[in-house]
Image (cartoon, coloured by chain):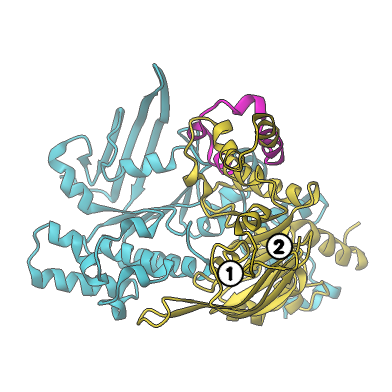
Chain colours: A cyan, B yellow
């Protein structure tokens, strides 16, 4: 195993195709090159059908490339002898928490993965406790998962993945079915796991407010990577994003619109605070003036 | 068509250890032709409440009136109420099942015992309302359509029943920004062009701000606020209590006002924010 270098995920010329109907070949992924460093927080966006989820499923060998290479810590996903090692290195969290919960108590649910690895009971208990602590759900140990809120269920699902001690977690629209506070719970958890515990995160989302949390945003379209940059650079391209059927944060769009009217606000503002600072910076006097105080 | 609920309570599993009050003493009247959004956290009672609007759920206590008729009164046919008040559930495309788009949309009208011509007319009309091309799509399998199209086929299935009120539970969730936009534009047209009374349940405050004229806020089974969209999103304390947040653009205007810029804070859309900021800057002679 090649653990040298800090690349955890390496994707080279990845093509994934399947046949539809008689003999029409569909290329869901069409020549993807991507390398993700240990500890990165990468967000993947793109319209429905752009290939995001298909790519995500290649990262823990749920899908195997039609051609090209996906390697996790130097382990080729096409080599069956690495399968379990790869699945343990990269954990997946899906959109619907209800489809991911298998047991009648939170504790058993989180223990499900490690039990299947044949880990001794003491160690399982330790891992379960720690994983629930990580996602802030310790007090729910003996609760029935189906009675939890959406955000809580999704955090239990994340704990289940964490109990496998992965180095990387891949989340496919983990907040799509949650309300605003559930969304916040999950995002705070993911951010903390990345920043404090150094877990590599790959997160797919349709919410641009979530995409700005990443260190890096990958934009996919028609099975290809069409942009790969820091969020600020990606979202400042308002027109390109529109052509790709994607949104930008509301304040970014507003800065762009005002720019067209001659108000020189930088077009790469992403948050309310940044916009307000920028506007106050551009107009430091008069009505706007007192704003800097 | 108006909907009125009076002192409505709904208790799940009464008398058991799992007893839970999902709707607590809600009184609410929605007039004909309104566009109302119902917002609140998961578990605040939104879905339970809307299922009372067409009699899918029976109140534990309290009354429900559709067009002035007590729907649980004697001699009222719930079937006719359900035809008048159409409910589009979350992820309605999961309910698609037929081989073709036409058959799927025709399912409801056929069950009403309508003749072929009338069924055909209704399917055509419903597809038009949902922004779907009849000729191009009617013979296609609903399962090979895009996410946004599937959802609109499912909506057309409800529209083909020719309801006057349409209740939508999270109609845009899980769609990409373009699909979202398509579905929301369609809903706006149903209200503006076809005159439907629309009741929208959504977690997206941006969507609510863009579409609804009136917002009802639920929190822990109770109705805690009911007012114009502009007023509600300007009430930070209410939204906070309900675990919600105003759209980013509204929060921006509040932030600017907090920094002593003389802007209105009851702003709902990017367009409005642009005009307001330009207005203030021009007033100061800073931008021509």
Q: Residue, x 66% and y 24% (percent of image)?
A: B135
Q: Say which chain tag 1 marks.
A: B
Q: Where is residue B282 shown, x and y percent of the image?
A: 90, 63
Query: Is B255 in front, or is B122?
Result: B122
Residue B54 visible? The answer is yes
**Residue B127, magenta (yes or no):** yes
Query: Is A221 in front, or is A125?
Result: A125
- Residue B209: assigned label: 2
**Residue B24, magenta (yes or no):** no
Query: Is B153 in front, or is A121?
Result: B153
Residue A45 visible? The answer is no
Check if mark 1's residue and mark 2's residue have beta carbons within 8 Å. no
Q: How far is disc 1 from disc 2 in space, using C-alphas?
A: 21 Å
Examine the image and state in which quarter residue A117 appears.
Answer: bottom left
Q: Residues within 10 Å of mark 2 (few under 14, many from 20)?
A: many
Q: Is residue B73 left or right of residue A290?
A: left
Dominant SS in magenta: helix
Residue at image mark 1 = B49
Q: Where is residue A205 shown, x and y percent of the image?
A: 48, 52
Q: Residue, x 26% and y 76% (percent of image)?
A: A141
Q: Which residues make up the magenta segment?
A: B123-151
Between tags 1 and 2, which lies in front?
Answer: 1
**Of marks 1 and 2, which one's residue comes earlier in the chain?**
1
Q: Where is residue B209 shown, x and y percent of the image?
A: 71, 62
Residue found at the very far front of the displayed protein? B75
Task: Examine the rendered structure and indicate whether residue A79 appears above or below residue A147.
Answer: above
Q: Say which chain tag 2 marks.
A: B
């Amino acid at each position: 195993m090649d653990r040298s270098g800090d690349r955890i995920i390496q994707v080279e010329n990845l093509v994934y195709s399947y046949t539809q109907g008689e003999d029409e070949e569909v290329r869901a992924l069409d020549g993807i090159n991507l390398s993700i460093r240990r500890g990165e927080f990468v967000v993947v966006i793109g319209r429905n059908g752009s290939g995001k989820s298909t790519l995500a499923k290649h990262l823990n060998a749920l899908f195997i490339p039609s051609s090209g290479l996906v390697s996790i810590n130097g382990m080729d996903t096409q080599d069956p002898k690495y399968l379990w090692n790869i699945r343990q290195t990269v954990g997946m969290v899906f959109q619907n928490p209800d489809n991911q919960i298998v047991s009648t108590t939170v504790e058993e649910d989180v223990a499900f993965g490690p039990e299947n690895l044949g880990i001794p009971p003491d160690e399982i208990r330790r891992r379960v406790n720690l994983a629930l602590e990580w996602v802030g759900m310790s007090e729910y140990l003996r609760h029935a998962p189906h009675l939890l809120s959406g955000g809580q269920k999704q955090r239990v699902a994340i704990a289940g993945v964490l109990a496998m001690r992965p180095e990387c977690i891949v989340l496919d629209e983990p907040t799509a079915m949650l309300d605003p506070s559930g969304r916040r719970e999950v995002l705070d958890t993911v951010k903390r796991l990345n920043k404090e515990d150094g877990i590599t995160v790959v997160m797919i989302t349709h919410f641009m407010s979530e995409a700005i949390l990443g260190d890096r945003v990958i934009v996919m379209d028609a099975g290809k990577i069409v942009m790969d940059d820091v969020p600020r650079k990606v979202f400042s391209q308002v027109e390109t994003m529109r052509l790709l059927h994607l949104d930008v944060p509301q304040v970014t769009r507003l800065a762009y619109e005002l720019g067209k009217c001659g108000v020189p606000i930088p077009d790469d503002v992403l948050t309310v605070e940044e916009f307000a600072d920028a506007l106050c910076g551009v107009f430091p006097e008069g009505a706007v003036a007192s704003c800097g105080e | 068509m108006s909907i009125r609920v009076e002192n409505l309570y709904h208790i799940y599993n009464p008398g058991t250890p799992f007893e839970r009050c999902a709707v607590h003493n809600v009184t609410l009247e929605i007039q004909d032709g309104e566009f109302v959004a119902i917002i609140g956290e998961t578990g605040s009672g939104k879905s339970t409440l809307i299922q009372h609007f067409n009699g899918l759920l029976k109140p534990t206590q309290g009354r429900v009136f559709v067009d002035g008729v007590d729907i649980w009164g004697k001699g009222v046919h719930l079937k006719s109420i359900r035809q008048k008040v159409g409910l589009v559930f979350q992820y309605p495309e999961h309910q698609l099942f037929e081989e073709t788009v036409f058959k799927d949309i025709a399912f409801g009208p056929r069950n009403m015992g309508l003749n072929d011509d009338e069924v055909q007319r209704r399917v055509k009309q419903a597809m038009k309302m949902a922004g779907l091309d009849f000729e191009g799509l009617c013979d296609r399998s609903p399962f090979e359509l895009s996410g946004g199209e599937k959802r609109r086929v499912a909506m057309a299935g409800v529209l083909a029943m020719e309801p006057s009120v349409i209740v939508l539970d999270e109609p845009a969730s899980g769609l990409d920004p373009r699909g979202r936009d398509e579905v929301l534009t369609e809903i706006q047209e149903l209200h503006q062009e076809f005159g439907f009374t629309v009741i929208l349940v959504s977690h997206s405050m941006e969507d609510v701000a863009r579409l609804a004229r009136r917002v009802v806020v639920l929190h822990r089974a109770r109705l805690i606020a009911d007012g114009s969209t502009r007023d509600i999103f300007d009430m930070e304390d209410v939204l906070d209590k309900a675990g919600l947040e105003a759209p980013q653009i509204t929060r921006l205007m509040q932030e600017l006002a907090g920094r002593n810029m003389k802007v209105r804070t009851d702003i709902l859309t990017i367009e409005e924010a642009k005009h307001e900021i330009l207005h203030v800057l021009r007033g100061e002679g800073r931008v021509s």
